[in-house]
Image (spheres, rainbow, N blue to C red):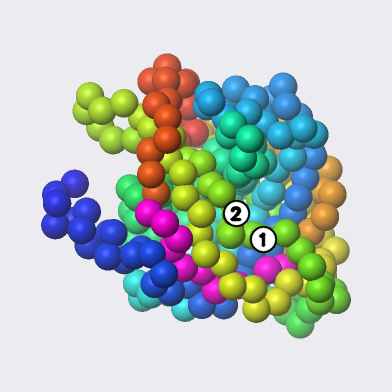
Amino acid sequence: MSVRGAGALYEMVAPGRPLYRDAHYLAADVELDARAAGPLVPFPLRLGSPARATVFTAWFPDTSFGSVYREAGVFFHVVHGCTPAVFCPWMVVDDDVALIAGRELLGYPKKLGEISFRFEGDHIEATVNRRGAHLLTMRARVGDRLSSAPPMLGRPHRNVRTSLGVALPKLIAFTPRETIREVRHVELTLEVGGSTRDPLVSMGLGAVQAARLHRVDLAAGSLPLPVAPVSPLWLADHTLLRGH
């Protein structure tokens, strides 16, 4: 990427600048099989105990870069040193600008997919398909407002940022700024599928423990900083999962 191109991307996510207004996240905290999920986590991260993940679909109606789009992903709950964080092993979007910015700057392993996020009264149905394979269905009935809930994005993130060539992959650290509009409890059913390139069904995702609809505003926190090298062998083992 050219210096000019990198500068444009960093300008897009400058610290403190609003990026998303009224972002909707339908999120399910699920049990996680540590034996299946462990190899997907790069050293020096380790899964939390007990092992947990958050599966989500999202709709972004108002962004600073002019895109209205949808997203889906998985966050593993991990520990880096003594810091609880989340690590993203898989994510899809249906907008190319969001894909480029998220991969190049923040290390999210974004790929293009087909995502729907539909409201009908107090019901939401979200589906994810890619390359002819069905990956996710989330059906939810929205309930009462929650007075306290864990953050959706506003927590420490650890992702792997890579580039073509001789540069080693790096673990990067950042924490988005999240302003809560409202969080509601939802009754949710989750169906997980998969394919060779998107093996969600073999990630170890288990039973839903809690589910919520988050409506939040998001801004960049500090710029992502490299905190540790990542083994090229780990990256090679997960090329199909992270690649297009």
Q: Taking 167 as reference, is 128 above or below it?
A: below
Could you tell me which residue is drawn at 59 percent across and 72 percent down? Answer: 179
Q: Nearer the viewer, residue 36 or 9?
A: 9
Q: Which mark is residue 155?
A: 2
Q: In the rendered image, which quarter is residue 226 located in?
A: top left
* Residue at numbered disc 1: 151
Query: Is most of the magenta stretch helix, strand or loop?
Result: strand
At x 77%, y 45%, the residue is 30
Eyeballing the image, is 41 above or below 226? Answer: above
Q: Residue furthest top?
A: 233
**Range of the magenta residues?**
213-223
Position in image of residue 142 (x %, y %) = 80, 73
Residue at 51% across / 54% down in the picture? 175
Query: In the rendered view, does 158 fall on the left or right side of 128?
Result: left
- The answer to whether residue 4 is above or below residue 169 is below
Look at label 1 and name its amino acid.
Answer: Pro
Q: Are marks 1 and 2 in contact (CB under 8 Å)?
A: yes
Cα gap from disc 1 to disc 2, whole angstroms: 7 Å
- Tag on residue 95? none
Give percent across and percent down for residue 148: 79, 68
Residue 202 appears anywhere in the view: no
The picture quadrant where one finds residue 56 is bottom right
Residue drawn at x 80%, y 34% is 50
Q: Is residue 82 left or right of residue 238?
A: right
- The secondary structure type at the circle numbered 1 is loop
Q: Quadrant of the C terminus?
A: top left
Q: Residues within 10 Å of mark 2 (few under 14, many from 20)?
A: some
Percent coordinates x, y for residue 176 in the rendering: 50, 59
Q: Amino acid at mark 2?
A: Arg
Q: Is 84 contained in the magenta span?
A: no
